[in-house]
Image: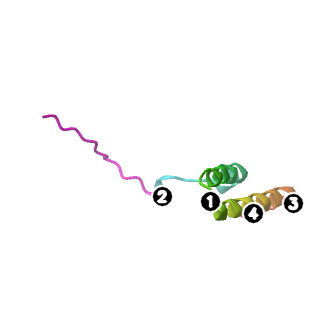
Amino acid sequence: MLLTGCVSTHNPNPQDTKFKTSERNWLEIYKTELIICIKNEDIEGYHFFMQEIINEKQKLSTGSREK
């Protein structure tokens, strides 16, 4: 009998990952999430991310980056 297993020696924390909000491409993130909502037939998620896409496009057109 042979038993195997997997052991993780490092437990990552949210503090281990540093994000720069200004370097995030929110439109791409929202479009990816929108595709997932369509695949899962998630109507509420679809409406949420569609509104976020509209808001982000408005921010980009006015030059506002408040997120």
Q: Which residue is mark 1?
A: 42
Give the amino acid type for the residue marked by disc 3 in the picture.
Thr
Identify the residue at horizontal 79%, vertical 60% (top origin).
54
Q: Earlier in the sequence, mark 1 or mark 4?
A: 1
Please give the label number shown on residue 9.
Answer: none
Q: What are the residue bounds of the magenta stretch?
A: 1-15
Q: Earlier in the sequence, mark 1 or mark 2?
A: 2
Please give the label number shown on residue 51.
Answer: 4
Which residue lies most toward the top here? 2
Q: Which residue is mark 3?
A: 62
Name the mark nearer the viewer: 4 or 3.
4
Please give the label number shown on residue 15.
Answer: 2
At label 1, counting other C-alpha atoms closer than 10 Å, the crowd grade (few under 14, some 14-19, many 20 or more) is few
Q: Earlier in the sequence, mark 4 or mark 3?
A: 4
Q: Earlier in the sequence, mark 2 or mark 3?
A: 2
Name the mark nearer the viewer: 1 or 2.
1
Mark 1 to mark 4: distance in Å? 14 Å
Secondary structure beneath label 4:
helix
**Does the magenta run of residues contain 8?**
yes
Q: Is residue 2 left or right of residue 11?
A: left
| Viewer-side residue, 37 vs 26 | 37
Name the mark nearer the viewer: 3 or 1.
1
